[in-house]
Amino acid sequence: MGILIALIPAIGWGIQPLVLKKIGGRPTNEILGTGIGALLVGLVVQLFMSPGGISITTFLISLLSGAFWVIGQIGQYTTFNLIGVSKTMPISTAMQLVGTSLIGVFAFGEWAGTTGKVIGGVAIVLLVIGSALTAVSDGG
């Protein structure tokens, strides 16, 4: 059951671009709807799960993180309209994987040893190449 609950965000984020494209609207409308949805989910979790008190530091870091998230989402929503969902999502997903991998290496010391770094570096290069190939169009 825990695995099914853990899959809900992945399914939601996967379906979201298709729903946004179908409903239409400007990126500002889309981010407002996404933000309201995130707020409602947060309130439900706060009410029913009763997490412990939130310190001012935690709140401010969360606020800053949310601001950067909004900037990224607006860019992604704008890109949906410019090049389409089918080209945006693979590139966006690949860049998130590259970013989190590099943060893991540089900030948390993952991929210990030379072999780990070489294999990880090759994997990142292959990921970027594969992502770039998704943007190639026939005849264009």
Image (cartoon, helix red, strand yellow):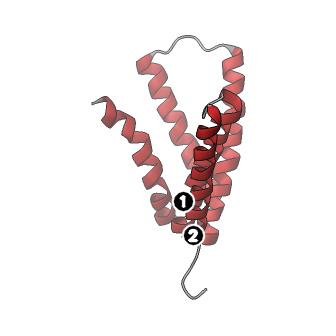
Please state which of residues 94 and 18 is positioned toward the viewer in this rendering.
94
Q: Position of residue 109 (x, y in %)?
A: 66, 29
Q: Along the line of sight, which residue is nearer the eye, 120 or 130?
A: 120
Helix, strand or loop at mark 2: helix
Q: Residue 89: give its label.
A: 1
First-in-chain label (1 vs 2): 1
Q: Quadrant of residue 84?
A: bottom right
The span from disc 1 to disc 2 (Cα, nearest Å) is: 13 Å
Q: Nearer the viewer, mark 1 or mark 2?
A: 2
Q: Which residue is mark 2?
A: 133
Identify the residue at horizontal 55%, vertical 63% (top origin): 130
| Whether residue 118 is situated above or below residue 62 in the rendered picture | below
Q: Amino acid at mark 1?
A: Met
In the picture as drawn, the residue positioned furthest to the left comes out as 1
What number is the disc on residue 54? none
Residue 113 image offset from top left, x and y in percent: 63, 33
* Residue type for callout 2: Leu
Q: Is residue 53 above or below residue 29?
A: above
Identify which residue is drawn at 51% across, 64% down: 21
Q: Quadrant of the N terminus?
A: top left
**Which quadrant holds residue 70?**
top right
Identify the residue at horizontal 56%, vertical 79% (top origin). 137
Q: Position of residue 85 (x, y in %)?
A: 53, 65
Residue 80 position by quadrant: bottom right
Left or right of 33: which side holds 71? right
Residue sitting at 63 percent across and 45 percent down? 118
